[in-house]
Each structure stands twice: as structure tokens, then as C-alpha cells.
Image: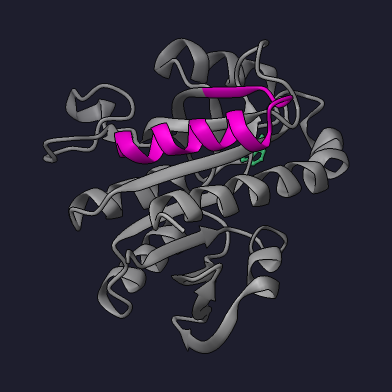
């Protein structure tokens, strides 16, 4: 049975999972509460990382070092970067990169991490396939998109910035943790998948739509997660 690490940036994103877990053991490490237990028969560690790439990377490393998770799933909300990706739709990561990595002064392209072999981190193909199938089976009316997630320590609520992200990186959605988790997973050689429900359009309307649609977005992600856990451990 695979031990699954689930990271959400905010309480709202992980509370539903925590409520359903059994045999829970809570451990506080680096000011993060790690909930280890069983969900629908599967071993699991769920944690709220806090917002941003530093929190997300530290959190992933702890899941690997202290809990020995076999894979990491990151859930949460994101801002859409494409007109066909609507509020409440789901984006599954093909890959993830950091849009705010900038060593252009050294002659690197935007988003490229100096002296690393890779700056674009590929999600696990099996996890993508399984997640797509869960969406088909359990969320048939929902728009599901599979594409690049671009992360940065920035809440994008500006149309010019949004346009730049699309033009430069061809992203499907933007958020603040995914690529850090992806990079930490890559460095530790474990599979990952980012699942994001769209809460806003990452433009000048972003702040308003965000609060309105957050609850719906989180509900859909929860359904997807439950289905995915069942498939991963064939329950
Ligand atoms: N998470 C949800 N919406 C976002 C946005 N517009 N920018 C960054 N992170 C987000």
C-alpha cells in the first residue's frame, strides 16, 4: 500500500480530509501540523503547508524525511490563465515551473533555475491518468484541463501580469506552491501531482471571484481526491 502525502496551502483545503481520517496522529514540525492516519483504508499524511513556495518546499521535504511518503499530491485553488478554463473547473498538472525565478541577469531565460538540469518538473503520468478517470467517473459535468501550472510568490490579480504569464510560459493556471512541491518531489525522486480547482481568473476581478467560488472549488477537489486515493491503492 502506498503512503500518500497530501499538501494544501490553506486550512479550508485540508480540513475536509482531516475530518474523515481515522487513527490520527498529529505532529507539529516546523510550525506545521502533520495529520498521519488512515483514509478509506489508505495510509495518509495530510498537512497545511501555509502559503507560498518556501512553506511548500519545507513541507514536502518533511513528508519525505519524517514520514517516508511514496508520493505527494498538492490540492487547492488557482487562478485561470485561459479563457476556456472557467471558475470551478479543475486543472491537473502536466508539469510545473516557477514563474518568478529570474536569473536573466546571468543570461538565463525567465523561469530557469541556474545550475539545475531541470526547471520544469513533470508530474507522474499514472497519477494524471488516474485523476482524469476519476473526474470522468465522479465529476462528469465538471470542466477538466490537463496542462502546465505556473507558481510564484504572488497572488496574480492583474491582467497585464496574466497576459505575460500566458505568453512567456503557456500556463493553464497560476498559484503559489505547486512548482515548489514539484521541485522537492523531483529532488527526492518521488512522483507528484498538482490538482487545482479554479477560484478566479487571475485578472482584475480575481479578489472578488476568489472568495465566492472557493467553497465550490474545494468541494470538487475533495471528491477527486477521494477517488484518486482509491485508485492509487486499489481500494
Ligand atoms: N490562488 C488562487 N488564485 C490565485 C491567483 N490569482 N494567483 C495566485 N494564486 C492563486
Q: How many marks?
A: 0
Residue 136 is one of the magenta-drawn residues? yes
Colour scheme in use? one colour
215 to the left or right of 83: right
Q: Vertical placement of 120 versus 69: above or below?
A: above
Is residue 123 in sight in this rendering?
no
Q: Position of residue 60 (x, y in %)?
A: 37, 63
Q: Which contiguous range is marked in magenta?
A: 123-145
State the residue in front, 220 or 40. Answer: 40
Residue pictured at 51% horizontal, 81% vertical: 31
Can see residue 179? Answer: yes
> Quick check: 112 above or below 32?
above
Ligand 1 resides in the quarter of the picture at top right
Q: Nearer the viewer, residue 124 or 173?
A: 124
Find residue 105 and report its horizontal and vertical position in percent: 25, 28
Q: Estimate the x, y position of residue 94 in percent, counting from the top left.
A: 38, 28
Where, by quadrant of the figure, is residue 145 drawn? top right
Residue in the image at 30% along x and 39% along y: 124
- The answer to whether residue 201 is left or right of residue 155 is right
Position of residue 8 relative to residue 80, above or below, is below
Query: Which residue shows up at 59% across the image and 28% down it?
Result: 136
In the displayed structure image, the side of residue 33 where residue 201 appears, left or right: right
Who is closer to the viewer here, 219 or 43?
43
Residue 141 drawn in magenta? yes
For residue 214, what is the image quadrant? top right
**Quadrant showing the N terminus:** bottom left
Q: Position of residue 147 (x, y in %)?
A: 45, 23
Residue at 75% x, 48% y: name it.
219
What's the magenta bit mostly, secondary-structure-wise?
helix
Amino acid at each position: 500500500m502506498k503512503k500518500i502525502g497530501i499538501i494544501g496551502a490553506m486550512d479550508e483545503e485540508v480540513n475536509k480530509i482531516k475530518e474523515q481520517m481515522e487513527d490520527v496522529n498529529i505532529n507539529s514540525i516546523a510550525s506545521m501540523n502533520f495529520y498521519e492516519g488512515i483514509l478509506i483504508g489508505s495510509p495518509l499524511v495530510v498537512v497545511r503547508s501555509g502559503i507560498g513556495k518556501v512553506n511548500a518546499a519545507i513541507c514536502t521535504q518533511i513528508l519525505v524525511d519524517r514520514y517516508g511518503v511514496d508520493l505527494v499530491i498538492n490540492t487547492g485553488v488557482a487562478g485561470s490563465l485561459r479563457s476556456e478554463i472557467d471558475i470551478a473547473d479543475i486543472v491537473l498538472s502536466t508539469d510545473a515551473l516557477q514563474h518568478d525565478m529570474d536569473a536573466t541577469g546571468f543570461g538565463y531565460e525567465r523561469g530557469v533555475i541556474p545550475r539545475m538540469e531541470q526547471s520544469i518538473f513533470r508530474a507522474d503520468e499514472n497519477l494524471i491518468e488516474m485523476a482524469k478517470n476519476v473526474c470522468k467517473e465522479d465529476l462528469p459535468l465538471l470542466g477538466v484541463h490537463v496542462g502546465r501550472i505556473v507558481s510564484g510568490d504572488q497572488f496574480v490579480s492583474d491582467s497585464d501580469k496574466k497576459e505575460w504569464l500566458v505568453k512567456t510560459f503557456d500556463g493553464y493556471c497560476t498559484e503559489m506552491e505547486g512548482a515548489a512541491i514539484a521541485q522537492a518531489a523531483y529532488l527526492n525522486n518521488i512522483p507528484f501531482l498538482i490538482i487545482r480547482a479554479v477560484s478566479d481568473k487571475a485578472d482584475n476581478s480575481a479578489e472578488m471571484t476568489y472568495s465566492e467560488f472557493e467553497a465550490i472549488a474545494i468541494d470538487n477537489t475533495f471528491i477527486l481526491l477521494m477517488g484518486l486515493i482509491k485508485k492509487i491503492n486499489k481500494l
